[in-house]
Every structure is written in structure tokens, then in C-alpha cells.
Image: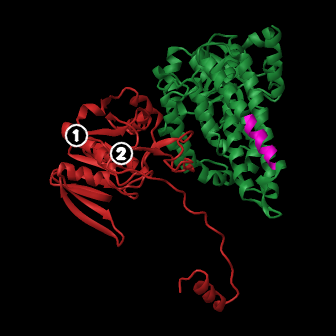
Chain colours: A green, B red
Amino acid sequence: MDFTLPEELLIFRETVRKFVEKELEPISEQVEEEDRIPGHIVEKMKELGLFGLAIPQDSGGYGMSVLGQCVAMEELSRTNACFRTRIGTNNGIGSMGIVIAGTQEQKRKYLPKLASGEMIGAFALTEPNAGSDASAIRTTAVRKGDTYLLNGTKHFITNGDIADVSTVMALTDRSKGARGISAFLVDKGLPGFSVGKLEKKMGFRGSTTCELIFDDCEVPAANLLGREGEGFRIAMQVLDKGRLTMGACALGALEKLLELSMEYAKTRVTFGEPIINRQAIQWMLVNMAIDAYAVRNAVYHAAWKLDRGERVTKEAAMVKVLATEAAGRAADSAVQIHGGMGYMKGMAVERFYRDLRLLRIYEGTSEILRMIVAREMTR
Amino acid sequence: MKILVAIKPVPNPDEKVKIRPDGSGIVLDNIKMVINPFCEIAVEEALRIKEKQGGEVVILTVGPKEGEQQVRTALAMGADRAIQVEAEKGLDSLAVAKFLAKVVEQEKPDLVILGKQAVDDDNNQVGQILAALLSWPQATFASKIEFLDGNKKAHVGRETDGGIETIEVPLPCVVTTDLRLNEPRYASLPGIMKAKKKELKVIPSASLGVDAAPKVKVLSLASPKERAGGRKVADVAELVAKLKNEAKVL
């Protein structure tokens, strides 16, 4: 077995790490305060190619392996989570539907611009009464000549307010349940389509989450993604890979938390000794290191499997649970090791503690993912 | 303009290095190698010159095969092609300069840019020796480079202790870069994709007919002494007494 990363991934990891250390980390607290990413930083992210990691080369992207995407997300997650969230939708839920099921025309229209970052993509499935239970959505799409009439409200939509194109799930046939869901590409500014309330969140400052409201919104029939009734299948495919890269995000944060905690424990002196000499602290650090080792191998292995074309529904679900729960434990230990300082605004561990809480909820809660694993184990 | 840039892979300066127990070198296991920061500035400068006036940027390195990753990184930054003289680790400055001179004779560039020194051994010799071997003028510690008279000559600002010295050198010449010359770009993903298809020519060192036998031998390495904590004194008299009797500097 050879565990070495391909050379181009080593080089790209180096690039992203440098970019994070030199340009993102120094402003991560400023972004936290101002709740927005400065425009010139987004421009640099575009130049580096970060918006087009996952989009195939023949559609203007870089067609990176899932392993490569995991490496990029891992590195980007060593700082404020808003940065990787900005590129996250274009590399995942905001573009993958088009990659999987788009017509040539749809691919030509959207993918090159999503890959360059000129356009932002979003994915709108969740509704006030339908999250994990995706088939309970109520947004409807009724065919009317050459258009579909969309009505309903989506919420918790990442990048929804800045998105130029949103992949929206709506019912075209209520009687068919999940098989009655279809996916639509909805352009910004379409009459009847508006951005509702911007949510105030526990963390993820610098990244937006909002409502999308459809009020007799006429979407051209050409913007149907796949065929009628294929929306749910497309959505589930889109989510599989997302779980793996989410595991990579948790991994990056976990590794950074371990480093921050090691550093602090070496310099913080109590009763005449650095606290790293104390077993109680050592064990917390060791447990973080054990988790990091397990998570790293699990993320990379599942990514490698997916790149070989194997089905990884079970592994992806397991990886996301393993990684995000480990990161949650690490955040808790990191705050504990930092003591009172760890509870103060302006400390990275305080920010990670809040931000990482979301990872066990979005793109599949730990509970839903365990259900998926159970189903896979018993099929 | 055809520019040749020599680069050297060095241990990542942000990582702590440990000396091997026998003092013969540093522990390289698990140490990430990167392009020497001064060499990275040299690559950047070459790319900027090319972007301004066209031409070709060729990367050159002398060392073991593992250095390929740093060469590819330079290609990903935007260089056109690369040459690696595959040689053993730990050559001394003279041997490296001799290999570089051979390739310069073959490639006939208008300009050779190198980092002023590599941050591993801090020798600060290769650029100067190379210029001597080629009988070319040299402009070391450059913080500014300007070309005049249709690239017949260059004005190079050199960082000295007292300020900036500007000198004029005819081309072809050897320039070594200082820290403030520029801020190197990243190897972007589009750059990395393009770099995969760029030429990397490997030349076995034996084929160049160079006597690479070391003239310098490293006898041993030792860590700097650990700094002891400072001490507080009550008054000037005690300070003077301690400087006189303990430190014996008065």
C-alpha cells in the first residue's frame, strides 16, 4: 500500500496552507467581527482556482479527485469556517446537480462561471417543515406552458442571498412522495423569487444562511434539472460526496485545535510548571491526536474508494459521523485546556467551538447518518 | 529575454529542525521540503520580467530526485520548463556552481537569477562562484532590477548595511535576490494543472564531466546553547559588581 499523495496534491496542499496562514488566518477575527469576507480575498480565492475544484475540466473546472477536494477542504478548515463555506457550495451542492444531471446547454451556461467563481451556486432543499425528512417538502412546481410556476419557502440556505443560481427542489407530483420531487435551476432576480430573512446564527459568521421565497415564480421549463420526479435521486447523489468533504473539514479543524492546544499547554504555567506536564492535560491532547489519526485515515480511504468509482454511501456517512463528532470533542477539550481564555471572544478555540457544532447537524445529522449506516448494514 | 533560475529545496523554515545524535546533519524524516524562500523570490522576479517583456523562464536545480516536487511548484508558478541535474545530496557550493555553469553554457540564457543564499546552510556562495566560473558580472542581494538599452545592461539596487547601492552590469549576468525584491505568487490550481504538461529534463550529473569532489567537509553540527533566564538586580551598584565579577565584561 502506498499512502503518498500524488505530487500535484502535495503542491496544492502547500499552496492552500500558505494562503490560509498568510492571508486568511490574519483576518479571521476581523471577518468574525464584520460578518463578511473582504472582496479582495474572494478575488484571490478565485485566482487560486478554489471555486472550481470539483467541476470537470471539460466544463471549465479543474476536475480534482475527491481526495484532492478533501485535501483542499482540510487545509481551508484550519481557519475561520466562512472561507471554505464560500467556495463550498460551488464545489458541492451548488453545482453537482448540474454536473450529474444537467443538459449540455445547462452545463455550458452555468458550470464555467461557477468554476471561476464569477457565479455562486446554492442548493435549496430544506424547508421549515422538511430538513432531514426531505420528502416532506411543500414547495410546489406546476407546469404552465413553457414554464413551471414555483410556490413555497426554503430556509437555512447557505450562500442563498449571494447565489446567482440555486438548485431548488419542488414537488411536481404530490401523490408520488419523494418520486414526485423535481429539481430546478433558478436564476437570481427572476420575478416572484426573493431572498427572505438572513438568519442570525451561533457561529459561521462571515457566511450567510437565508430564506428563499417563491411566490408564483415562473421558471423556464428549460431549467428543469434531469426529468420530472428525478429531484430526490439527484439530491441524494449530491449529498454523498458532500459528506466526505465535510469529514475533511472536520479533520482540518481538529488538527488545528490540537496544534493550538499543544502550543497553549506548553506555554501556560500553573503552580510553577507548564500544564502540558500534567497527565490530565496530556490525556486530552492524546485523545485528540488519536482521533485525528483515525479520522485522517478514514477520510482519505473513503475518498480513495470513491475515486476508484466504488459506492461509498455507508463509508461517507460513517466518515461524517466519526469526523464531526471527533471534532466536537476536540473543540470541547481545546476550550477546557485554554481555561478561562478559551471562553473569550477573539480566541480561535472559542470560534471553533461554536462553528464546529453545526457540523453534526447540516448535510445530514449524525442521527440520520447512523440510520443510513444501519440500513446499509442490514440490506 | 531568456532567464535561467536556479532553485534549491530546503527544509521548511517554519518547522523546528533537530540535529542527528551524531552531529552529522539534521533529521530529515517527516520534515517538509520547500523551495528556498530566496529562490522563490528569484522565480517570481523572472516571471515578472517575462510578463513585462516576453521570453522564457527555465528552472534549474541540482540534487536528488526528491527535489522534483519543488521544481514542479516553480513550474506551477508559471515557469516554462525545467532542468534537473540529478546528483547526490549534500554537494558543496563549488560543485553545485560547476554543474550550474555547465547547464548555463548549454542553455545560453541572458540572465541567471538565484536566491542570495539557501536558508539551510546559509553559505551565500553559489551565485558568486557561478559568476566567477562563467566570467560574468554579478549583482548580489538585489532589491530592484531594471533593464536598459534593449536589455544590454541592468541597473540593480543592492541591499547593503547602510542603504541601497545601485550598480550597473552588462548582460548576460548573474543576479542574486534579497528578501525585499518582491512577494512571490502562489502556485495556483490552474498553474498546477498546466505544470503537469511542462517539460522537466533530467540530466545525470555524471554526464556533465564535472569534478564534484567536495572541497568543504562538515565536521559537526551543534544546537545553539539554550538561553538561560535573565536576573533582576536591586540597583546599579549590584549590576556593576555582577558585570565585573561574574560576567567579567568590565
The amino acid at mark 2 is: Val
* Location of residue A2 by image quarter: top right
The amino acid at mark 1 is: Lys
Lateral position of residue A376 relative to residue A109, left or right:
right
* Relative vertical location of residue A98 with respect to residue A248 in this rendering, above or below: above
Mark 2 residue crowding within 10 angstroms, few (<14) / some (14–19) / many (20+): many
Residue A214 at x, y = what percent?
71, 28
State the residue at coordinates (70%, 33%): A293
State the residue at coordinates (22%, 40%): B102
Stretch of the chain drawn in magenta: A281-291
Residues A264 and B193: in front is: A264
Residue that mark 1 sits on: B102
Mark sitting earlier along the chain (2/1):
2
Residue A185 at x, y = what percent?
61, 22
Alpha-carbon distance for marks 2 and 1? 20 Å
Residue that mark 2 sits on: B43
Lateral position of residue B124 relative to residue B190, left or right:
left
Within the magenta stretch, is there residue A20? no
Task: Tell me if I can see residue A342 in this picture.
Answer: no
Q: Quadrant of the N terminus of chain B?
A: top left
Q: Chain of mark 2?
A: B
* Relative vertical location of residue A218 with respect to residue A77 in this rendering, above or below: above
